[in-house]
Image (cartoon, helix red, strand yellow):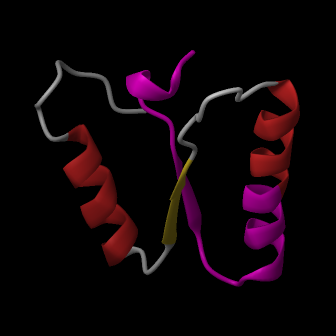
Amino acid sequence: MLVGVSGSGKKSLTTLATALAKGTLKNIEPRKNYGRKEWKEDMFRIMLLTATKNKPVIFLFDDTSIL
């Protein structure tokens, strides 16, 4: 978990760490009419990717994704 003020490079650090780990970076970007059903579908896709690929999947959830 990375905590810091806006503009301190948390997303950049996460992207760099993901590249070094040879992983896949996934984040959820809420859209209009985004609800519990869409959240579950997105999480299912991320978990399915984690289970089927033999490489790390990093889930990025930032403060702009909170509704």
Q: Is residue 28 above or below residue 25?
A: above
Image quadrant of residue 50? bottom right
Residue 20 relative to residue 53: left or right: left
Q: Is residue 67 above or below residue 62?
A: above
**Residue 47: % across, % down:** 79, 58
Image quadrant of residue 64? top left
Image quadrant of residue 53? bottom right
Residue drawn 43% across and 81% down? 22
**Residue 31: % across, % down:** 59, 35
**Residue 19: % across, % down:** 34, 74
Q: Is residue 64 above or below residue 19?
A: above
**In the image, farthest residue toward the front:** 32
**Residue 1: % across, % down:** 43, 33
Nearest the viewer among 38 and 48 is 38
> Which quarter shows the C terminus?
top right
Which residues are the magenta region?
45-67
Q: Is residue 16 above or below residue 52?
A: above
- Does residue 24 belong to the magenta stretch? no
- Does residue 64 belong to the magenta stretch? yes
Residue 40 relative to residue 64: left or right: right
Residue 61 relative to residue 15: left or right: right
Residue drawn 70% across and 84% down? 54
Residue 15 relative to residue 27: left or right: left
**In the image, farthest residue toward the left:** 8
How many labels were placed on the picture? Answer: 0
Residue drawn 24% across and 39% down? 10
Nearest the viewer among 67 and 18 is 67
Residue drawn 32% across and 75% down? 20
